[in-house]
Image (tube, grey):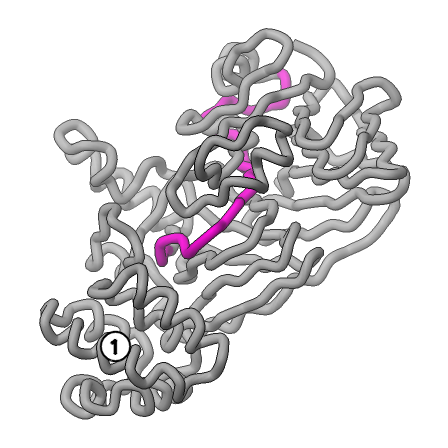
Amino acid sequence: MNGIYKIVPAVKDYAWGNEDFIADLLSIEKNGPMAEMWIGANRQGSAVVEETGRRLCDVLDEDPSFCGFTSENFPFLMKVLAIAHCLSIQCHPDAVQAKAGYAAEEEKRRTVDRKLWNYQDANQKAEMAYALTPMTAMCGFRPFEQARQMLKTAVPNLFEEYLSEIGIISGLFDKLYRMDPETLSFGEAELLKNADLLSEDVRTLVLELGDRYFGDPGVFSPLLMNIIHLKVGEAVYLKPRILHAYIYGNGVELMNNSDNVLRGGLTPKHVDLDELEKVMEPGTYIPRPMESVVDKGGKHFVCEGGFTLTVMENGSFVNSIPAPRILLCTRGEAKVNGELVLKRGECCIVGSGVDSVAVDATEATVFMSTSNN
């Protein structure tokens, strides 16, 4: 296997997806929610080599020399997200936590359904999201005093009886998440009644979550977590351990090649609160749009997690970054190394036998994912 090969992404139809964005991008028939496109070699959703119809993960395992990696150690996973409503609140382990957690669940993997595993693999999971349309997310805990004041305003009775003596943000999270169902429902009813006392973005999200997830402690999350709004072309980086939830919008996501997710509500899926609190960052984290570096290769969003997203738009670009390299065209029609044509929605992988990648994106937009290592 040599050179550059077109690949076809795997599509995930999670309930929180929208019906339009991915279907339009791939020029396929709309058929219910399409939440994610997976463009990589992860065995839970491997891309397929267009020419042969074989899964990319199998091809790389048979010929690791193509890009220097097998499916197991492939360094990143590229996705397109199409979000109609809030994903689960979640965080992901760092490298040490992932290795320890995966090892600790060896017996669990033999005896328990995969849906109940906390760790799908032994890899850390950092991630970034680039907004193709305006995107909104919750990222990291707010400053304690800010969260405390909002709770005191919106749920004065619940606050006075259960929360007033707590002095750290993770303590508020823990107390709300461990309340008995009756008390939690009482508190959420009070929150929804007083939602007009909160700022517009917090109020809007509280009402949406309360309508969809009443009885889930995640309904309180807009008071505990920062809300960030990304404009088109902006990106946010989420290092491991940061609690977060994407709310709506469409974007390109890039992450370590891992499916490790510790969930914290707003979902019917498995939640292990003890493990979540062991993994998550307990203090304040303020998210900010990422800075980028621009050169002849395009606009680069470099992530300390070990991967870089490069945007090539309305011009010609040359990159000599080592393999593996995965490219996705989201607008127009681009040409790669003078031969391979990528139309809107098409992807390719570039092997180690190709020293540099020249992209003619004169009237197109192309995203390239690469490893920093």
Q: Position of residue 337 (x, y in %)?
A: 84, 24
Image height of 226 relative to 57, above or below: below
Q: Which residue is mark 1?
A: 171
| Element type where label 1 sits in the image | helix
Residue placed at 49% from the left, 38% from the top? 36
Q: Position of residue 172 (x, y in %)?
A: 26, 78
Q: Is residue 87 magenta?
A: yes
Q: Answer left or right for 53 relative to 343.
A: left
Which one is nearer the viewer's eye here, 204 or 92? 204
Q: Answer left or right for 32 relative to 187.
A: right
Q: Position of residue 50 (x, y in %)?
A: 62, 14
Residue range highlighted in magenta? 66-90
Q: Is residue 222 magenta?
A: no
Image height of 139 relative to 307, above or below: below
Residue 317 visible in rendering: no
Q: Answer left or right for 266 relative to 45.
A: left
Residue placed at 51% from the left, 10% from the top? 62
